[in-house]
Image: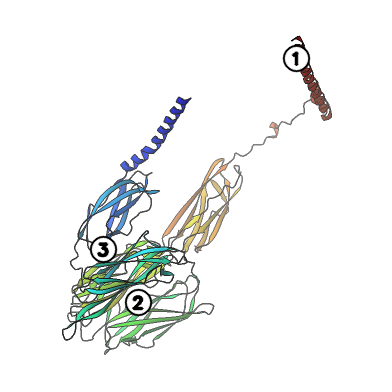
Amino acid sequence: MRSLKQILAVLLLAVLLAGMTPAAVFGADSIKLSGPNVLFVMQGASTYVDVEAKAPADTEYKLVLECADRNITMTNGKSGTMAGDGKYTMSLSVARQAEVGNYNLVLKAVDPKDSNKVLAAKNLFVSVTENKNSYSSLNGPAMEVTYALQENDHLVAGQVNYVTFTLYNRGNKNYSNGKVTVSMEKGMTIQSGALSRNVGRFNIGDTVSVQYPILIDSSVENGSYPFVISFGALTTQKSEEGETQAVNADMTETVYIPLVGKEKSEEDTSIPVIALIGNKIGGGTGSIKKGSDFNLDLTFKNTGKSKTAKDITITVSDASGAVAPASSELIYLESMKAGETVTQTIPMKAIENSDENIANVNVTLGYYDEDGKNYNNTAQFSINLEDATTTSGKGVANPILMVTNYSFGSDKAVMANSQFPLSLTITNTSAKALRNIKVTVQDSTGSILPAEGSNSFFINSIGAGGSYGKLMPMAVSNDIKAGVSTIAVNMSYEDMDAHTFTSSDTITVPVTQQDRLVIDDILDPGYLTAGEAGYAQIKYYNMGQTTLNNLRIAVSGDFTIDGDSSQYVGNMANGRSDYFSFNFIPNGEGEMNGKAVFTYENSQGEEQVIEKEFTFNIQPAPEFNPEDMDFPVEEEKHGFAALPIWGKGLVALGALLAVILVIKGIKKHKKAKAEALTLDE
């Protein structure tokens, strides 16, 4: 028996090893990874890394790109689960303070269920080159701020998060008595310690780091939140008399950090919301000469979902008085339906003797909904003004920086709850070199934010007529409304004589929500025979956040429809559910196959088709022939079977008594025999 147990144990171990070994060997040998052998990236720059994996169709894995050095970061560091051959694009960023040299990157294919289990790996390299223009050549203060989290790549509501902010001095001034202060949103507090931290000296090219234990209330919702980092210190400058003196210097930067917390409550989309979604100044020239007349084209949209806005008043004004409407500053619109877009052309004039080089135009909107409730919105944009006696060439009074090109990685729209690469081209349209340029990208709704780091970046200089390209990974929130999002690009800069200027441009990014039509399984109608009419019902739901347009449903298969085989539903709002029912007659017995085809247009006007297949089992139709019917004849009963029930009971009782008597006789006989044997002894 022992040897049999040993044999069984050996066999069981062999089976387990046979089941485990091929998977490990299979994964390591079958997945082949490839990517660029060497990447060349300048300090403070970003690039995209295209990687590829080849694997059998039934092999599942995730791709991960890692670097041990904290100055080399990957934005899209992890892919979703892949199967078979796959490609993935990751964003790599090099911190400006990263040292020049070569860094090792590791591309891994890992088990989707256990990221510590590496199925395949490949080494890549990034060569960091020197950014020779790392520092500003002017005397203005300049710094960059990055952040790092201790455990996650996002903040978590309801607990303490340890956040380290790193400041980099990219200016050309040394500072002493430095103090760092952080400002946060409501619901966020420092668990212990002060908001301000003393960091001492902060010389050119230095970095300083401060860590804060930030307690975030559990009620804080999902989103990307701003943290304002302020730096105050002493620096030196020469007075008009040529003497060196100590002066206060302040710098401020904002970084956005994603947070996972409470799901945002459903917003009321039934109210009308009139928003300024675009402006065109003087036919798109980008700047206006003082003393000239020009047209201002403003585009408005009712971004509400259902209600009409009525009695809309639009007021255009400039507090500085540098520009003004040529006639009335008030525009009246009778109404705007939900989703309606209207463009208004407003004649404007630029005041000739104005001292302003920038006009900040305010647009105030007032309107009512269908129930008489009043609403108000405001918007602002800038107009660049040139002196009437100068041109945009050499010697301009106000050299202009503007966005001359941009892209967002898609021909149509970016998807909510995703990331996209925002590419900007900044052009110096004047004949003067400009430097110490700060560019800030800002979405007024807070729905499109940098995927990491700050929403600002620095450009050391752009020559006359030159351009500078910048790629920024951006993240779109999950609850953004489908439509056109407006992003302001604000720029501040200086010329070679240290004169300061500002300019602003607006870019638009179309956003769409993922459409999601969910169709329940089509339930079997039950027992059916060939030729017998049946009934089926299909329930479906719009579980996305957009309306499905021109929805149509049609069914077909091995059956004949009794009635209509299709239905036109029209537009189906998000959150709605409905059903489609049909009567059918099977064409024959056996498996009856069919399919329901749902066709609709998404928010971008693209036709989408979803098919739902089903199979019912149809039984043969029963055959009926009166001549073949046999009627049962009761057989004549004899003996015990012929007795009535009470007679059968008496017989059974008698049999039971006979058995008892026999048993007693046997016991009596055994007892007598035993006594006889006792006497003989």
Checking the image for residue 674, the label placed there is 1
The label on residue 519 is: none
In the image, is residue 292 above or below residue 461? Answer: below
Query: Quadrant location of residue 163?
Result: bottom left
Few, some or many residues within 10 Å of mark 2 (<14, 14–19, 20+) = many
Could you tell me the amino acid type at mark 1? Ala
Residue 19 place in picture, x, y as percent: 40, 37
Q: CA distance from mark 2 to mark 3?
A: 36 Å
Q: Secondary structure at mark 1?
A: helix
User: Circle 2 is placed at which residue position?
Assistant: 279
Q: Residue 406 at x, y = what percent?
A: 29, 68
Quadrant (top left, top right, bottom left, bottom right) of the C terminus:
top right
Q: What type is the residue that disc 3 sits on? A: Ala
Which type of secondary structure does the marked residue at label 3 adopt? loop
Identify the secondary structure beneath mark 2.
strand
State the separation of the CA atoms marked 2 and 1: 125 Å
